[in-house]
Image: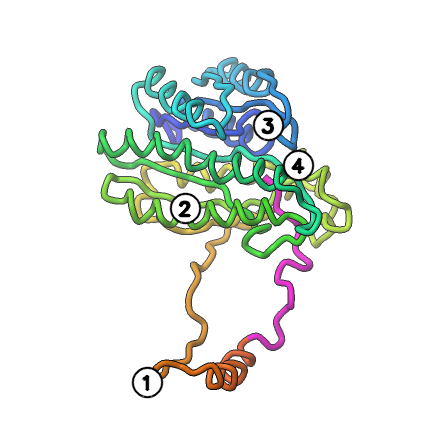
Amino acid sequence: MGQLDGRVALITGAGRGIGASLARVMAREGAHLVVNDLGGAVDGAGADQAPAQQVVDEITAAGGAAVANFGNVADHGDAEGMVQQALDEYGRLDVLINVAGILRDRMVFNMTEAEWDAVVAVHLKGTYNTTRFAAIHWRQAREGHYRLINFTSVSGLHGSPGQPNYAAAKMGITGFTWSCANALHRYGVTANAIAPSAATRMLQDIPTDRQSGSMGDPTDDPRRSPDNIAPPVVYLSSTASDWLSGRVIGVRGYKIQLYANPSIEREMIGSRPWTVDEACSEMEGAFRSALEGGPVFPWAGLDPQIV
């Protein structure tokens, strides 16, 4: 008996890296899968059916159930087709996991409009596209135990300086996940986001000075294996996780972390509207001490998280 016996899952970006690891482990746990991957380069260029098909072939050769999908998550029609393929092949869809992503790194003052748009289209719009069509099915079926699992990033949570497009898209996914958790719970859907740390091909495009950290060589350290991301995702995909929704789960090495959702740290309460002079005078005294001693850039010193 596996943790996911009979569950049907669509995983985007599952031809390589974290997505492929999820597919293999979830198949071993009994899930029936649609393995999606456009098969493009790290920057999104091109297409290749081989990565998704290879993962499917490995799964089926081991006795699992999987079919390949080669659509582009940034294309609204392709996203609808992915969801429909799961319904046509297996008669249901229980789990949607949005992993697909690309990188076009640049400092904000050097970033082109095209580099911004391409990353936002795949990560943020792509997550919306697949979720929309899955949510339509879930709202109609209302059988419960549905799971939406999106992938955010510490590059957004901590503000990676060379990835403004990626960071913005990933934080957009976090807010989108919270919105879906609130909107879809009545239909038996939980929505959570994973903030993983793993060595994948995307890491190769990150400058060496931003790959250093406490976890050693990221390409040779077993703590950075994409396989480490799978166990908590399996749990979130299972019927046992109904209680957990609207949260960000971090996975770093052998750590599984529950992030705190944003909360008010301090506030100034007036009895009437604040004047400009009053706000200028009081904010420093009220807020500055809360920030003293902390890093100017919270991201500094952390390993970059790449998906």
Q: Secondary structure at mark 2?
A: helix
Q: How much space separates mark 3 and mark 1, taking CA atoms?
A: 57 Å
Q: Secondary structure at mark 3?
A: loop
| Residue under the image location 67 percent in, 45 percent down | 111
Q: Position of residue 9 (x, y in %)?
A: 40, 28
Q: Report the coloring of the rendering.
A: rainbow
Q: Position of residue 207 (x, y in %)?
A: 75, 45
Q: How much space separates mark 4 and mark 2, taking CA atoms?
A: 24 Å
Q: Quadrant of residue 55?
A: top right
Pick whichever of labels 4 and 2 is earlier in the sequence.
2
Q: How much space separates mark 4 and mark 1, taking CA atoms?
A: 52 Å
Looking at the rendered image, the disc whose residue lies closer to the viewer, 4 or 1, is: 1
Q: Position of residue 21 (x, y in %)?
A: 55, 30
Looking at the rendered image, the disc whose residue lies closer to the viewer, 4 or 3, is: 4
Looking at the rendered image, the disc whose residue lies closer to the viewer, 1 or 2, is: 1
Q: Residue type at mark 2?
A: Phe
Q: Residue type at mark 4?
A: Met
Pick whichever of labels 1 and 2 is earlier in the sequence.
2
Residue on which the image places disc 2: 176
Residue on which the image places disc 4: 202
Q: Nearer the viewer, residue 260 or 224?
A: 260
Residue 16 disc label: 3
Magenta span covers which residues?
291-307
| Residue under the image location 47 percent in, 48 percent down | 172
Q: Residue type at mark 1?
A: Ser
Looking at the rendered image, the disc whose residue lies closer to the viewer, 4 or 2, is: 2
* Circle 3 Cα neighbour tier, 10 Å, few/some/many (<14 / 14–19 / ≥20): many
| Residue under the image location 55 percent in, 23 percent down | 38
Q: Quadrant of residue 47?
A: top right
